[in-house]
Image (tube, rainbow, N blue to C red):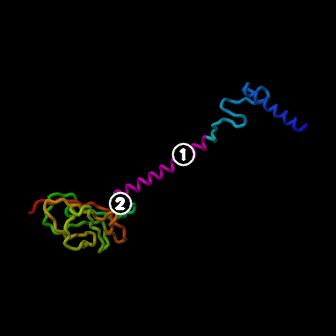
Amino acid sequence: MREQMHRTGMENRDVEGVRKLLTDPSGGNDCPSLAQGEMPGTGPHFGFGQSWGFWGFSAVVMGALLLVTFLWLGVRSASASGVSSQESGSKAPRVVSTFPANESRDVDPGITEISVTFDREMTDQSWSWAYEDKNRFPQVVGQPYYTDGKIRNALPVKLEPNKAYLIWINTSRFRNFKDKSGTPAVPFKFTFTTGASR
């Protein structure tokens, strides 16, 4: 009974302390003063540690999302251009010239072969003369072959007058033009337009 009364007395004193706090923010001599926005024993609601936890986590998440976005855009760009990361490097073979000249007009339709020349020796019996539109690809009348130390590849064709041709030398899917080490050549778009019959 005495123990219970003692506890009740303590509770009454606690209630009285809270009443003082509500009526007198300074708390008199019994309570420390509390600045506005604070709770007893907790400090400010938005202390540095709390705000840093939230914003720090947010910054990490945003940074990760941005990194993934940049990587995705880079891969997508490479795919759209048909050039892989390996092919776009300085070690990948490249077309340095064509016959007829790329994007040339009024080409003699009587020529019997077209060709591409690379910047290095290529693998023999391996090529990808590819089309984007069958109607713009020349009629092939023989097998491709290498000349000039396997840096020039020729394709026997029969051309039509007054026609625009579009040929791909390697694509993202067909990559058989390769150098001696097996590295595929960078895809190359080869176009020309024939003139009237000579």
Q: Is residue 90 left or right of residue 54?
A: left
* Element type where label 1 sits in the image: helix
Q: Is there CB contact under 8 Å for labels 2 and 1?
A: no
Quarter holding the N terminus is top right
The verdict on residue 17 being magenta is no
Q: Position of residue 162 (x, y in %)?
A: 14, 59
Query: What residue sits 19% from the left and 72% below the top?
Result: 141
For the stretch drawn in magenta, what is the main secondary structure?
Answer: helix
Q: Which mark is residue 21?
A: none
Query: What residue sits 79% from the left and 32% below the top?
Result: 14
Q: Amino acid at mark 2?
A: Val
* Element type where label 2 sits in the image: loop
Quarter holding the C terminus is bottom left
Q: Amino acid at mark 1?
A: Ala
Location of residue 79 with respect to 122 vertically, above or below: above
- Quadrant of the rendered image containing residue 36: top right
Q: Neighbour class for label 2 at 10 Å: few (<14), some, many (≥20)?
A: many
Residue that label 1 marks: 59
Residue furthest to the front in view is 1
Chain part drawn in magenta: 51-80
- Quadrant of the rendered image containing residue 153: bottom left
Query: What residue sits 22% from the left and 64% below the top?
Result: 137
Q: Position of residue 41 (x, y in %)?
A: 72, 36
Towards the viewer: 198 or 1: 1
Query: What residue sits 33% from the left and 65% below the top?
Result: 185
Find the distance from the CA under tag 2 to the CA under tag 1: 34 Å
Q: Position of residue 54 (x, y in %)?
A: 59, 43
Q: Neighbour class for label 1 at 10 Å: few (<14), some, many (≥20)?
A: few
Q: Is residue 34 left or right of residue 146?
A: right
- Quadrant of the rendered image containing residue 127: bottom left
Residue that label 2 marks: 83
Mark with earlier residue (2, 1): 1
